[in-house]
């Protein structure tokens, strides 16, 4: 059985692809290798996959309608889709809004059309984000909460993706599951995420910018736990009417940002120099995942605390950058 993984050179996509290959699935990976962050990192992730049996890679942009349509012709009989490709980053969306409508709306629509016209497709799992909870003040965030108050364009496009997928499930019977990821970190992580930014700056003896004067909390979720949740979701095909579900994938533990920084300091055995700054536009003070539905339906049980996960990330960072 073949699984199409979009964003296969990305952080989560490369880990998911490896896990699928390890259990014997064939993986068709696609990615456009854009320059949002260091392409060398994306190529290094990809290099861990390209020599593995059962992996095929194609470089294409999901926003390219013709390229996605041609992909279906070259790979008929797709069994499942794990759609992780997207334009990420809340702050980037403030200055580059069209990147988000192109990848997260047009690109997402193209993938839904691919699913619609793929005979025998069993399931489409796609990435959403905890950002859809926007200005919600009820903690922890539940999938039953209203999510009509986004505070960034990134969040708005991710919520649009959920609604589009539900519509396609309703119209065409496509089994689809949306996964709201909560601040994922770990080896091979993205350079625009806090774990990478802080580790790099502290390692280079440079100050780090701490927003909202450090008064922030995040549900930091280790990559291995996220991968386990993605695979469990992929294997759990919704049979609702319409066949569409949404789950939170988080650690179910909201950590103070300052403690997160302290764990990085301990792992590096270096002290951070802090520059305290106000809250940034589009940001939120706290995230915290209610994972009851994920636990009940998927058996999702995150097991990695930041005390274990951050040192693993720091070890990878030092090895990758030869620090």
Image: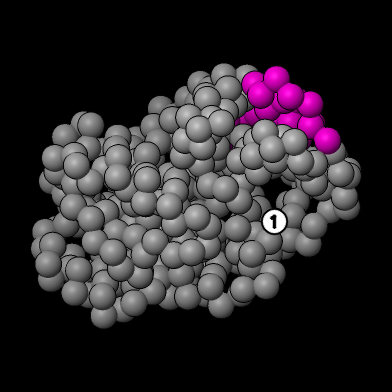
Percent across and percent down for residue 215 are 85, 39
Residue at figure coordinates x 51%, y 37% from the top left:
321
Residue at figure coordinates x 65%, y 59% from the top left:
90
- Element class at badge 1: loop
Residue at figure coordinates x 88%, y 52% from the top left:
278
Residue at figure coordinates x 24%, y 61% from the top left:
58
Percent across and percent down for residue 273 are 83, 35
Q: Is residue 214 left or right of residue 122?
A: right
Residue 268 included in the magenta stretch of the image: yes
Protein image colouring: one colour
Q: Is residue 79 left or right of residue 102?
A: left
- Report which residue position mark 1 lands on: 134
Q: Residue 112: tell me if it is visible.
A: no
Q: Which image quadrant for residue 260? A: top right
Q: Is residue 64 above or below residue 320?
A: below
Q: Is residue 37 left or right of residue 218?
A: left
Query: In this picture, which residue range is highlighted in magenta?
Result: 250-273
The C terminus: image quadrant: top right
């Amino acid at each position: 059985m073949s699984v199409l993984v979009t964003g296969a050179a990305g952080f989560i996509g490369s880990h998911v692809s490896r896990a699928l290959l390890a259990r014997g699935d064939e993986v068709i990976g696609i990615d456009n290798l854009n320059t949002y962050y260091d392409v060398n990192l994306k190529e290094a992730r990809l290099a861990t996959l390209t020599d593995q049996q059962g992996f095929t890679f194609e470089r294409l942009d999901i926003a390219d309608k013709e390229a996605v349509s041609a992909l279906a012709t070259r790979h008929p009989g797709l069994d499942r889709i794990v759609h992780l490709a997207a334009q990420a980053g809340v702050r980037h969306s403030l200055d580059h809004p069209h990147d988000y409508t192109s990848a997260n709306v047009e690109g997402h629509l193209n993938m839904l059309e691919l699913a619609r016209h793929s005979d025998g497709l069993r399931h489409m799992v796609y990435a959403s984000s905890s950002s859809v909870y926007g200005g919600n003040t009820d903690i922890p965030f539940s999938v039953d909460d209203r999510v009509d108050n986004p505070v960034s364009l990134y969040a708005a496009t991710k919520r649009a993706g959920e609604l589009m997928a539900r519509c396609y499930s309703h119209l065409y019977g496509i089994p689809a599951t949306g996964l709201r990821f909560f601040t994922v970190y770990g080896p091979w992580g993205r350079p625009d995420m806090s774990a990478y930014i802080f580790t790099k700056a502290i390692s280079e003896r440079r100050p780090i910018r701490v927003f909202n004067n450090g008064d922030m909390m995040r549900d930091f979720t280790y990559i291995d736990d996220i991968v386990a949740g993605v695979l469990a979701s992929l294997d759990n095909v919704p049979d609702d009417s319409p066949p569409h579900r949404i789950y939170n994938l988080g650690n179910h533990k909201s950590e103070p940002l300052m403690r997160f920084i302290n764990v990085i300091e301990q792992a590096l055995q270096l002290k951070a120099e802090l520059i305290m700054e106000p809250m940034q536009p589009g940001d939120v003070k706290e995230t915290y995942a209610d994972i009851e539905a994920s636990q009940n339906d998927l058996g999702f049980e995150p097991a990695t605390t930041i005390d274990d996960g951050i040192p693993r990330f720091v070890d990878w960072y030092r090895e990758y950058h030869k620090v």
